[in-house]
Structures are given as structure tokens and as C-alpha cells.
Amino acid sequence: EQKNVERIIAGSEELRELEARLRAAYVNKERHVQLAESAAMAAETDAREAQIAGAMEAERQRGLQAEAYREFLRLEDGKLIKVGLDAQIKDKERLKAEAYQEFLKEKEQVDEVVRKIAAEEAAEAAAREAKEAETRRYID
């Protein structure tokens, strides 16, 4: 029966054209899916990098503020004021360290999600390739 189908297809120019169009449509659909996935991954990467850059800039600003604060303390007269301000700096540094640790934890969570998405996309791509190979075998 398969040979009859192949004979009929071989004998019909219209069926050969339809088969060629069908193959082209499958290729175009896959290309479109790949482009969409690539754009989504790029957007996600850009967003994650922007978030990290924002956190780093905030960290830099806090560092500049802390440095300016220390300079103020150095110039300030009076040991009592200096002791009180030093305690505040240590507290701010502790909070900064805690915030940085939280940032690292969140970054790891984001990276884990990205790894899972990449693994899912790879599995989907493999499944699509297997299905396409099966379809090609069926068509051939």
C-alpha cells in the first residue's frame, strides 16, 4: 500500500508540490519557534543582567556613601560623636552584607530557573527533532 501511495505521489505533480510546500511549512514553523525562543531567552537574559547591574550600581552608591561618611567622621571633632557614628557605619555594613547575601541567594534562584528552562527547551527540541525524523521516515 505504501508503494501505491509513493507511485501516486510520484505521478502527480500537484501532490509533489503539496508535499514540498508541507515540508517548507514545517521548516518555517520550526524556524519561527526557534526565533521566538531565542528572543525570549535574550529578553530574559537582558532583564536579569539589568537587575544585576542595578544591584551593583546600588552597591557602588552605598559604597560611595559609606566612604563619604567615613571621611566625615575622620574630620569630625569629638570622640563621642565618632564612636556613635562608627557604630552606625558597622550597622550599615552589616545590613549591606545581609542585602548582598540576599542578592546572591536570589541570583542563584534566578540562575536555577534559567537552567531549568534551558533543560526544558533542550528536551522539547530533542522531542521535536525526534518527531520530525519520525515524520520524515513516514513520508519517505
Image: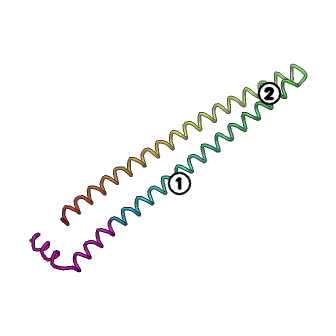
**Residue bounds of the magenta highlight:** 1-26
Whether 14 is among the magenta residues is yes
Picture residue at 17% right of the left edge, 75% below the top? 9
Q: Name the spot of residue 127 as percent of width and height, x first.
A: 30, 54
Predominant SS of the magenta segment: helix
Sooner in the amino-acid sequence: mark 1 or mark 2: 1
Name the residue tied to disc 1: 43
Mark 2 is on which residue type?
Arg
Name the residue tied to disc 2: 70
Residue with the most extreme top position: 79
Mark 1 is on which residue type?
Ala
Point out the frontmost of discs 1 and 2.
1
Q: In terms of depth relative to the viewer, which is nearer, 40 or 80?
A: 40
* Label 2: element kind: helix
Distance from the alpha carbon under mark 1 to that under mark 2: 40 Å
Tell me if residue 21 comes above or below residue 130 in the rendering.
Answer: below
Count how many numbered circles sit on residues in the image.
2
Picture residue at 33% right of the left edge, 64% below the top? 27
Picture residue at 34% right of the left edge, 54% below the top? 125
Q: How is the image coloured?
A: rainbow
How many other residues sit within 10 Å of disc 1, few (<14), some (14-19) or many (≥20)?
A: few
Whether 102 is among the magenta residues is no
| Cβ atoms at labels 1 and 2 below 8 Å apart | no
Q: In terms of depth relative to the viewer, which is nearer, 70 or 129?
A: 129
Q: In terms of depth relative to the viewer, which is nearer, 130 or 104?
A: 130
Tell me if residue 95 comes above or below residue 7 in the rendering.
Answer: above
Residue 51 appears left or right of 35: right
How many other residues sit within 10 Å of disc 2, few (<14), some (14-19) or many (≥20)?
A: some
Picture residue at 40% right of the left edge, 61% below the top? 33
Q: Name the spot of residue 2 as percent of width and height, x first.
A: 11, 69
Tell me if residue 79 comes above or below residue 91 in the rendering.
Answer: above
Residue 51 appears left or right of 137: right
